[in-house]
């Protein structure tokens, strides 16, 4: 393909729509990661929870022939995993990172193990007649100038994902619960001193975090694709964490960062046509995250130095 | 009937320290009750018990005559008791309003009602005549303003009794003045205040009654009007029985340490040291007396290279020392017995032998070409264990398995075995029994006779008087006194300087009593 | 000796004996418990659970060929276990081994395929370059952590992906045969491969190299000044600073040095096991190295045993799947359970406190 053809393809509504599709399974766990990080209990198990939810959704939807039942079961599975993670870390003092990694291993092996036992197939759940979340048609969106065809005709979960940005932002910054959770993550001693139940809030944060990841997982196997594949989450749980940090630990920033990752992913396949290796593009969000972390650290150091200089000036009477 | 009565309160910590020993304490409604004593006297523990942050091992608490159980800060708040901690428990990223109303946010349709919160807080602020913006982020506020936010945090929970723990520790004189004005306003409204401090001047300024604690016990309670400074100092410091020991005459040699204009502002912006200057000669012990928290810990850490001063210079043996470089400073001949033994002085999971060489492993006697000489290290450890009476079966034992006294001996062995030029001893006998304390004193005197210059920081006045050749007093980050003959001064006199009630005049920037 | 001293000495002896016992018992009990859990799961899922589990537990030693596979797999894990042991001893949680592994494999592949060198020199340069590039890559999170305070965990996770993508990039667009429809390179020339140690088996020269690496790592940590600095920083960073040990430099060195075995792990996978570069050369092996290091309590001397134990499970799982129609992913379940048990410090703490208190009662005072 010529360059202009690729450019046109990139700027086409179809491509932009695909970006939204690809961003969704990154955005949902990213929001989950955000909530847990702000509570001070970073959820490393997003990957495993997503994968489990994807699997459970497929299996239950196949047996009940209802996508919604599958979704509900996926949520339940996520909740159970969340409680396990929280219990191990908050009660048994297990290391959060190692436990998260263990859960990911557990999910990776466990899902295929059960899949194999149920269907005899180790790769995919194609044998199961699983259901899919419906696509939504919102005529109102078509009316939006330019972006209309991009915004419409997506799987319901795509809308849910972007709606969740608003919901999470609302929860975190406009409800007392959100304030409490952020307080616990920022300064747990201060929170305890006013009587907040630090442990309970952390449990709740991990629960919400896992439910969001579960939504992402359910979408992957019942919307993005229409079946379960082994290890289908392909590291999205970790990309989600990267998005949280790149987005400055804020819902809006997280959304933008997730979009960046999604765009890079979608772009990478397009550029394959141009004989630019897609890996270059795939690398961009990660390189950006590392640079963002470095820049943030430098800025913090400079600010601290400035503060001290100002204090010493103030003290000497200037 | 008193507002709060605490009877027979006893609290013993797991490490054996008796923080409170059958303490009786009561507060009348509407008074400002000062609770004073040195660090470790037990005042903070007592108040933590009252606020539900600690549970007593024995005793009871009565509020308005009724016996109560205070199991958590929530219980205390419900009883109308609030506490403003010394290290402020505020969330820097949050706004003033968010911090004050944390846990009791006003709601509207399930959401947080920000305008209502701001309104409520603004009303409260204006009532006390303060100038704080409810929507400002706490991180941007001055320390004095932050403290007011903490006070408001307690007040808006409807507390009638406010416990202030060393509130002026963080404030400038101006801010202290304003704080006192606010306290008087609060009392006029009918509130009661318990004011923990070790600054006697403040007790006089604001207190109605004063209770003195020492070593976990209440020494006495007096109306402030009837309490003289001498009486309070005597109560606070006690009449300690000093062992009769011959203090060998000092024969100070050449100048070893020279500190010039040392100032230090910590990460929170608070000035800890102000223009400190002094000298120590070889074969001399300079003691530093002072109530903990007046900058002496930071002074030692700066001299040891663990902190960087904001201004000033340090000269060791004629060499200007680079700040913040423990290795260079040690190589110039410094040894440091740290105040916090377990945090700084040892690595618990490593063996005795490995702990003993942490500052010298790179010397040719212990390693060559990057490889450790295990035999030499082991021999070194065995020799030190014998010399310093470290009781363990062999040098490979991890330090964490040793008793507290043994751990201190490991530290002493390491720091003293190389015959340092300058020895920093920070609270070297804290927590040690009589025998161990005596042993440490012997070691210090031994180093002195071998020509070491020693800086001894201690809260134990009798120890300082016994061992020091000269005694300086530090208060609020400044050297306020220097005594060329510590044994000629009474403890009460020293106490007055420690508590900021007296200071020696400077002549040409130097202390009158001798070249500081 | 006074009675007090005698009691103190015996208390210390008791404590040391307990700790020594714990060093061995803890990993073993963990693995046994995890195996127990696995067996329960197998009972639920397989029609012939006993047969399946026997395949798991005895498979790797049932034939010489399988034994060879076991050793071959363990060798890679030894390298990775060493990498994590070094960096964990300094209390740095860098997970960069996965990325260093990829770069190591890549560089070994480049040397093998694009740099014709005579005889043994070819292999030496390939391995050496892999070690070198692994350590160089460790500089990045090292500098970020030591001088900027950036979390080495997040940075290393990001850098892992970058390294992996770079590997794929060069593999797909440069190293694989031009016009090939598949995603792997030609086989390495024999001068750049690790030849068989025991002919006819898959046990190659990688094993003695890994064992040599183990010895070197142990010597580094416990006999060199560098290792000493690393361990002190890991044991108590405040103490290290107080004693004059340069914190930043030590942290940096820890991350750089641990890159050497990690890079060599990649070279081993490329030049030893596959003898070519393939797309999914690692399959997350870099993270399994963490478990090996945990099992070995970060002690290089125990890493080979931990690696053999862990590999045994992996290979046993493969065999179990092939012969008893039970998914090998059961093994992943067991592995995960091992990690969970290992990190649930609280369980061991409760145990320790009970023993401790009993011991204390005899000392008096």
Image (cartoon, coloured by chain):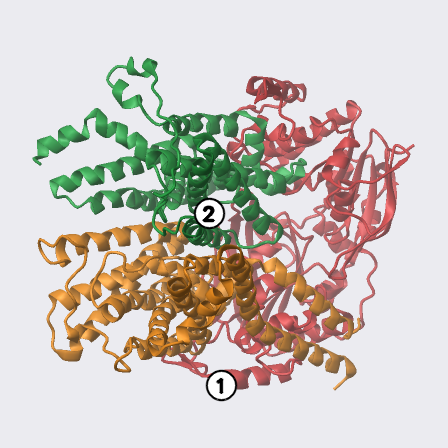
Colour for chain A in the figure: green
User: What residue do we see at 34% from left, 13% from top?
Assistant: A140
Per the rendering, the colour in which chain B appears is red
Query: Which residue position is annotated with label 1?
Result: B376
Q: Where residue C7 appears, x then y in whole percent?
A: 74, 79
Position of residue B13 in the picture relative to residue A260 (left or right): right
Dot 2: few (<14), some (14–19), or many (≥20) neighbours within 10 Å? many
Q: Residue furthest front?
A: C47
Above or below for B415 versus A13: below
- Quarter-of-image position of residue C282: bottom left
Task: Give SS at disc 2.
Answer: loop
Q: Report in which chain the residue with disc 1 lies.
A: B
Label 1 secondary element: helix
Residue in the picture at 39% in, 74% down:
C217
Residue B303 in view: no
Q: Are marks 2 and 1 on the same chain?
A: no
Q: Nearer the viewer, residue B344 or A122?
A: A122
Q: In the figure, C275 relative to A197: above or below?
A: below
Q: Is residue B127 above or below residue B319?
A: above
Which sits in the foreground, B228 or C171? C171
Q: Judging from the image, what is the letter of the chain drawn in orange?
A: C
* Residue A45 tag number: 2
Quadrant of res C116: bottom left
Q: Position of residue A313 (x, y in %)?
A: 47, 39
Q: Could you tell me residue B322's position as x and y percent? A: 43, 61
Picture residue at 65% right of the left edge, 38% below the top: A197
């Amino acid at each position: 393909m010529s360059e202009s053809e690729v450019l046109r393809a990139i700027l086409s509504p179809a491509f932009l729509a695909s970006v939204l599709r690809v961003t969704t399974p990154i955005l949902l766990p990213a929001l989950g990661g955000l909530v847990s990080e702000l509570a001070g209990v970073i959820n490393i198990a997003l990957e495993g929870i997503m994968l489990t939810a994807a699997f459970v959704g497929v299996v239950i939807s196949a047996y009940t022939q209802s996508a919604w039942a599958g979704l509900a079961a996926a949520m339940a599975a996520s909740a159970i995993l969340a409680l396990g993670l929280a219990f191990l870390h908050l009660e048994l003092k297990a290391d959060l990172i190692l436990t998260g990694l263990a859960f990911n291993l557990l999910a990776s092996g466990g899902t295929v193990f059960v899949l194999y036992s149920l269907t005899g197939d180790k790769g995919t759940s194609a044998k199961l007649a699983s259901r899919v979340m419906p696509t939504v048609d919102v005529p109102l969106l078509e009316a939006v100038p330019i972006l209309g065809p991009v915004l419409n005709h997506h799987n319901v979960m795509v809308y849910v994902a972007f709606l969740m940005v608003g919901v999470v932002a609302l929860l975190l910054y406009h409800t007392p619960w959100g304030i409490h959770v952020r307080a616990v993550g920022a300064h747990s001693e201060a929170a305890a001193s006013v009587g907040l139940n630090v442990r309970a809030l952390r449990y709740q944060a991990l629960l919400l975090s896992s439910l969001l990841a579960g939504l992402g997982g359910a979408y992957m196997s019942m919307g993005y694709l229409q079946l379960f594949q082994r290890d289908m989450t392909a590291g999205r749980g970790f990309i989600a964490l990267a998005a949280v940090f790149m987005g400055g630990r804020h819902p809006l920033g997280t959304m933008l960062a997730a979009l960046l990752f999604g765009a890079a992913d979608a772009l990478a396949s397009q550029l394959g046509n141009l004989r630019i290796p897609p890996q270059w593009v795939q690398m961009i969000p990660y390189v950006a995250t590392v640079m963002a972390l470095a820049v943030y650290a430098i800025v913090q150091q400079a600010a601290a130095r400035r503060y001290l200089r100002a204090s010493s000036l103030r003290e000497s009477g200037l | 009937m008193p507002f709060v009565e605490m009877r027979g309160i006893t609290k013993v910590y797991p490490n054996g320290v008796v923080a409170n020993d059958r303490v009786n304490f009561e507060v009348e409604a509407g008074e400002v009750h000062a609770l004073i004593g040195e660090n470790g006297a037990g005042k903070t523990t007592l108040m933590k018990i009252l606020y539900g942050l600690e549970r007593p091992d024995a005793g009871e608490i009565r509020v308005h005559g009724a016996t109560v159980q205070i199991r958590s800060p929530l219980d205390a708040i419900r009883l109308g008791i609030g506490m403003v901690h010394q290290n402020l428990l505020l969330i820097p990223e949050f706004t003033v309003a968010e911090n004050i109303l944390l846990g009791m946010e006003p709601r509207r349709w399930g959401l947080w009602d920000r305008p209502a919160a701001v309104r409520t807080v603004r009303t409260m602020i204006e009532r006390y005549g303060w100038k704080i913006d409810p929507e400002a982020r706490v991180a941007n506020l001055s320390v004095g303003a932050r403290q007011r936010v903490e006070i408001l945090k307690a007040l808006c929970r409807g507390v009638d009794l406010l416990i202030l723990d060393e509130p002026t520790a963080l404030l400038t004189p101006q801010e202290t003045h304003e704080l006192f004005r606010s306290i008087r306003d609060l009392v006029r409204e009918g509130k009661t205040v318990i004011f923990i401090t070790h600054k006697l001047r403040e007790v006089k300024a604001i207190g109605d009654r004063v209770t003195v604690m020492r070593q976990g016990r209440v020494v006495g309670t007096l109306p402030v009007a009837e309490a003289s400074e001498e009486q309070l100092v005597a109560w606070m410091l006690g009449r300690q029985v000093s062992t009769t020991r011959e203090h060998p005459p000092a024969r100070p040699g050449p100048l070893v340490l020279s500190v010039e204009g040392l100032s230090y502002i910590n990460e929170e912006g608070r000035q800890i040291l102000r223009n400190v200057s002094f000298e120590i000669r070889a074969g001399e012990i300079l003691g530093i007396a002072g109530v903990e928290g007046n900058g002496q810990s930071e002074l030692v850490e700066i001299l040891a290279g663990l902190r960087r001063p904001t201004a000033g210079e340090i000269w060791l043996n004629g060499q200007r020392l680079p700040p913040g470089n423990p290795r260079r400073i040690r190589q110039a001949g410094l040894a440091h017995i740290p105040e916090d033994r377990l945090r700084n002085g040892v690595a618990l999971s490593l063996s005795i032998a490995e702990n003993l060489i942490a500052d010298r492993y790179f010397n040719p006697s212990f390693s060559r070409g990057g490889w450790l000489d295990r035999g030499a290290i082991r021999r070194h450890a065995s020799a030190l264990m014998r010399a310093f009476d470290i009781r363990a079966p062999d040098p490979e034992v991890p330090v964490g398995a040793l008793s507290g006294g043994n751990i201190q001996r490991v530290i002493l062995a390491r720091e003293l075995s190389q015959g340092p030029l300058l020895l920093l001893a920070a609270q070297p006998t804290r927590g040690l029994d009589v025998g161990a304390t005596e042993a440490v004193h012997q070691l210090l005197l031994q180093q002195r006779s071998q020509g070491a210059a020693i800086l001894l920081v201690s809260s134990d006045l009798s120890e300082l008087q016994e061992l020091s050749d000269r005694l300086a007093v530090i208060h609020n980050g400044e050297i306020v006194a220097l005594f060329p003959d510590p044994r000629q001064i009474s403890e009460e006199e020293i106490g007055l300087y420690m508590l900021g009630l007296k200071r020696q005049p400077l002549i040409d920037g130097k202390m009158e009593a001798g070249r500081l | 000796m006074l009675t007090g001293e005698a009691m103190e000495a015996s208390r210390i002896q008791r404590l040391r004996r307990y700790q020594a016992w714990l060093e061995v018992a803890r990993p073993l009990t963990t693995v046994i418990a995890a195996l127990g859990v696995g067996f329960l799961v197998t009972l639920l899922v397989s029609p012939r659970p006993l047969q399946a589990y026997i395949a798991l537990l005895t498979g790797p030693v049932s034939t010489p060929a399988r034994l060879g596979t076991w050793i071959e797999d363990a060798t890679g894990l030894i390298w990775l276990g060493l990498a994590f042991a070094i960096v964990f001893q300094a209390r740095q949680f860098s997970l960069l081994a996965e990325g260093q592994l990829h770069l190591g494999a890549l560089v070994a592949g480049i040397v093998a395929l694009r740099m014709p060198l005579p005889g043994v020199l070819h292999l030496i340069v390939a391995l050496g370059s892999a070690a070198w590039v692994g350590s160089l890559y460790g500089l990045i999170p090292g500098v970020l952590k030591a001088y900027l305070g950036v979390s080495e965990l997040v940075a290393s996770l990001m850098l892992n992906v970058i390294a992996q993508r770079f590997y794929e990039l060069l593999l797909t667009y440069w190293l694989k045969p031009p016009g090939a429809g598949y995603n792997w390179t030609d086989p390495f020339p024999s001068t750049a491969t690790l030849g068989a140690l025991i002919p006819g088996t898959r046990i190659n020269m990688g094993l003695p190299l890994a064992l040599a690496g183990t010895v070197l790592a142990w010597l580094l940590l416990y006999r060199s000044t560098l290792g000493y600095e690393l361990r002190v920083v890991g044991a108590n960073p405040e103490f290290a600073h107080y004693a004059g040990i340069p914190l930043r430099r030590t942290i940096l060195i820890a991350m750089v040095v641990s890159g050497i075995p990690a890079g060599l792990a990649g070279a081993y996978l490329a030049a030893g096991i596959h003898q070519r570069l393939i797309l999914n050369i690692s399959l997350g092996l870099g993270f399994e190295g963490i478990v090996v290091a945990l099992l070995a309590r970060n002690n290089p001397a125990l890493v080979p045993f931990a690696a053999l134990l862990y590999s045994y499970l992996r290979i046993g799982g493969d065999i179990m799947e092939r012969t008893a129609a039970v998914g090998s992913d059961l093994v992943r379940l067991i592995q995960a359970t091992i990690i969970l048990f290992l990190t649930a410090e609280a369980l061991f703490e409760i145990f320790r406190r009970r023993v401790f208190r009993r011991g204390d009662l005899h000392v008096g005072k």
